[in-house]
Image (cartoon, helix red, strand yellow):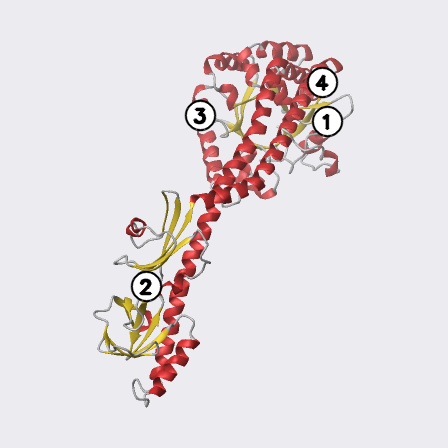
Amino acid sequence: MNKTGTVLLASTIGVLALVVPFSLSLYLAQAQGREDALATLHDMADDVLHRADNARMQISDAITALNSNPGELPCSAEQLTRMGILSAAFSHVAGMARLENDALVCSTLGNQDLPLNLGKPDGNRPYGLRFWSGIELPNLPGYQFSVLGRDGYAALAYPDLAIDLLNRESPVSLAFFTGGQRRVLGRRGVIRDEWVDRYQGQPLQFEDDGYFVVMQPSAATDNAALAAMPSSLVQAQVRRSAYILGPVGLILGVLLTWAVAVIARRRMSLAGELQAAFERDEFFVEYQPIIDLRDGRCVGAEALARWRNENGALVSPNVFIPLAEANGMIQRVTSRVMEIVVRDAATLLRGNPRLHIAINLSSEDLHAGGVETRMTDLVRQAGMRPDSLVLEITERGLMTPEKARGVLLAVRAGGFRVAIDDFGTGHSSLSYLATYELDFLKIDKMFVDTLGTDAPTSLVTFHIIELARSLGLQMIAEGVETEAQRDILRARGVQYAQGWLFGRPMSIQKLQEFAARAGQGLPPTDASTFLGPARHA
């Protein structure tokens, strides 16, 4: 990608980095405001049901107290006095009454025109209580009571008592109703009959004509509570959330935009430094040993590109390799690595025909061609055998068979060996094995890490091993860090491995010493000698 394209891409990402977090913060404010409003309505509905259940419990206790003294004459002055004391003691009881044959005989609220026949009960409630709603006493016209009774006594309660949670000016509406008949027993504010008609015995929330509505069933009875809030209140809650989240999103967007600008500037700067790195010869190679699991001997190493800039700082391969690919310089990196490997390792490889050095090829190397020619010229000049070099390719490099097949055929015809790297982490892995002629299959560290664990991926590792064996491919396990992993791989028939358990990337001089001692079956004299920088693919 050229400089103009990089600037355009960075500008686009910068705008998105500013707009997306701010837009997301507004969306979250909208969602949070609605969620807070609904949570408030649910809490209010639950509170109504709790108050209703508390009232039934108090009424049951009051009736139990009256029946604990059976010697009193029904409706006597003494009993009415005790009923008055009980009704005053319980906050949810407006008055007490004597109940005979479903009729109120006497009451602490007055006995004019009693008895009063209540008719058939509306239903039964917990604690053995029978229930009548909408009862009006003759001496108290205009006041309706809910009557709950058993064992010859009844309590009279105001229907609105359970919903008396708010001041009169509150815009939130509350209702308490029977679930079966959907009869509203008490209401406060705007309660529409069509809302109650929607109730089907399950928790329900919806938005209707400017209101958010929540209905909650009772766990003890078939009653339910309703709470409703005008949408204007919800939007006010959304605005409050936006006042908090909006600035946070804006600040985050500004920070991300700044970060994008810094990264883009650094990337363009790094691209220039990468170009200059070839001229200043700043690249070098480190070698990570490959061990034969059957006898512990060193059979070779993987060549890993390194870059130390003019300031003496190491630039991570995770940074400069993608940068080289994006700027069309990856083939120059590969060529430079080939030259360094032949220069460094020619003497070692000529004197040790069992050893090999593996060099990573990019997809651009395969698609452009010319790899076999460059490699042949280099090994001929160095007096090396072609099979001393193994070319490692990733699955991504094989995704265009019409370009890669011819290159790989020429490479293998020239005597070089080929390994597929990071197997199982790309696309259509099996088709690659069937399409191309390969010598080695490298098991990615991602799979090796799962060995000896309960991770499902560990089974995939074993399938990869069996697949390679059935195709006659030799295997190299990457990233082996524990003796347990080594033992499992060896028991499964994996021939070779590399990783920190055996040695970290090292210079060619240290590799020569390592190979000499490993060739004799001896460990290095000082393990720390071989623990260089962490491996980078």
Q: Quadrant of the N terminus?
A: top right
Residue 300 is at least partly visible in this image: no
What is the quadrant of residue 269 in the picture? Answer: top right
* Element assignment for label 4: helix
- At label 1, the amino acid type is Leu
For residue 90, side relative to residue 441 (left or right): left
Q: Earlier in the sequence, mark 1 or mark 3?
A: 1
Mark 1 crowdedness (10 Å alpha carbons): few <14, some 14-19, many ≥20: few
Q: Nearer the viewer, residue 501 or 56?
A: 56
Q: Where 439 falls versus 67 (above or below)?
A: above
Q: Earlier in the sequence, mark 3 or mark 4?
A: 4
Q: Where 194 falls versus 372 (above or below)?
A: below
* Element assignment for label 1: strand
Q: Where 525 falls versus 155 (above or below)?
A: above
- At label 3, the amino acid type is Ser
- At label 4, the amino acid type is Glu
- At label 2, the amino acid type is Thr
Q: Which mark is residue 221?
A: 2
Percent x, y of residue 258: 65, 28
- The Cα–Cα distance between marks 3 and 2, rounded to whole angstroms, is 60 Å
Q: Nearer the viewer, residue 277 or 95?
A: 95
- The Cα–Cα distance between marks 1 and 4, rounded to whole angstroms, is 13 Å
Q: Which residue is mark 1?
A: 314
Mark 4 crowdedness (10 Å alpha carbons): few <14, some 14-19, many ≥20: some
* Element assignment for label 3: loop
Q: Nearer the viewer, residue 273 or 317?
A: 273
- The Cα–Cα distance between marks 2 and 1, rounded to whole angstroms, is 73 Å
Q: Which residue is mark 3?
A: 428
